[in-house]
Amino acid sequence: MNKYINVNRIEFVITNNCSGKCRHCSAVLSSKNEALNAGIAKNVIIDLCRNYSIDSIMTFGGEPLLYAETVCLIHKTAYENNIKDRALITNGYFSKNIDIINETAKKLYESNITNILLSVDAFHQESIPLDPVMQFGKALLKNDFNGLNTHPAWVINKDNDNIYNRKTVELLNAFIEMGIEPSDGNNISPKGNAVEYLKEYFRKPKIEELFLPCGSMPYTGSLDEITTISVNPNGNIEECLFLLGNVYKENILKIIKKYNPYENVYSRMLIEGGVKKLYDFALKQGVKIDTEDCYSPCMLCKKIMDNIEKGKTST
């Protein structure tokens, strides 16, 4: 269908609204009650599964279980279309009502979801009460759900001895006593809130370390070898900083068919020469780039693109 796209994974950001306010969060959160259209999400899964061999699907946010019905429909559809790995990342805090918690756990089990990752760590529990999260875990266990793990965020890595990691271990032990083991979790990335509140834990890279090839950072890929389709609550399909299309306006297959990263001057430069080529281009255009607050190639890339767009606007 498109030589630059061979999909094996689908991701749905259910909402950018969240029940927590975490200091380490890298997501762009919103207080708006905007959520992914469940019917559109279902159609995306069906269309992609008819044309690609999809191995995995994930739902997350924001807090996705603020819209539990949408989450359940997505995973039910994924199961019906033979997607093997069907995962949800949630902070587990979507209600204090025990009846709602129990009913949601039952519906998730019935949707044939395979893995639920509970975000439990020092940062989430600063703004998220622990009791409803533990109640949710207990409700899942009562439904004989076997794919439940805590999913902590570590400062630097899980072996580093710092006040946040020690608190996280303490919290995880409470869930281990319930029979819920932790996943490996993830190391906090230097972006979003983390840059503002945890700056002392991140090493400032040298300029040459910011010039890595595009797609070399965690959770990224080359712009001409896309394997994951990610759908945002507003329907946008984006790859890094580039908008492929919007599933509320056109079918996902049409979006895929028309994609050509070499037609865009900026994505072409990133493919051919990485962030360095984009950086050199910006300098030649008279766009000044301050790298002082850039902790990764992705942060530098975004800053370059933002400054180029500002330059266009001002002229």
Image (cartoon, rainbow, N blue to C red):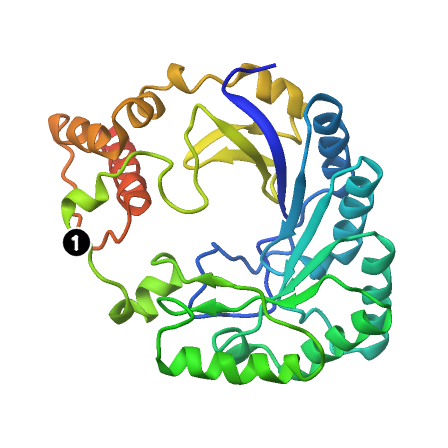
In which quadrant will I find the N terminus?
A: top right
Can you say whether 283 is above or below 272 in the image? below
- Neighbor class of circle 1 (other Cα within 10 Å; few <14, some 14-19, many 20+) is few
Rendering quarter of residue 142? bottom right
> Is 111 situated left or right of 28 in this image?
right
Q: Which residue is found at the position 38% from the left and 16% from the top?
A: 262
Q: Position of residue 47 (x, y in %)?
A: 74, 26
- How many numbered tags mark residues here? 1
The quadrant in which residue 176 appears is bottom right
The picture quadrant where one finds residue 88 is bottom right
Residue 101 visible to an observer of this rendering: no
Res. 95 visible in picture: yes
The residue indicated by pointer 1 is 292
> Residue at position x 48%, y 67% from top?
153
* Amino acid type at image mark 1: Glu
Q: In the image, is 74 to the left or to the right of 236?
A: right
Q: Is residue 129 above or below residue 84?
A: below
Judge by depth and name the residue closer to the eye, 105 or 13. Answer: 105
Up the image or down, 176 lies above or below 29; here it is below
Give coordinates of residue 92: x percent, y percent.
67, 69
Figure quadrant of the C terminus: top left
In the rendered image, residue 162, in percent from the top left (x then y), is placed at 35, 80
Q: Position of residue 16 (x, y in %)?
A: 57, 54
111 horizontally vs 211: left or right: right
Label 1: state its secondary structure: loop
Q: Nearer the viewer, residue 116 or 250?
A: 116
Residue at horizontal 76 percent and vertical 45 percent from the top: 74
Q: Nearer the viewer, residue 219 or 126?
A: 219
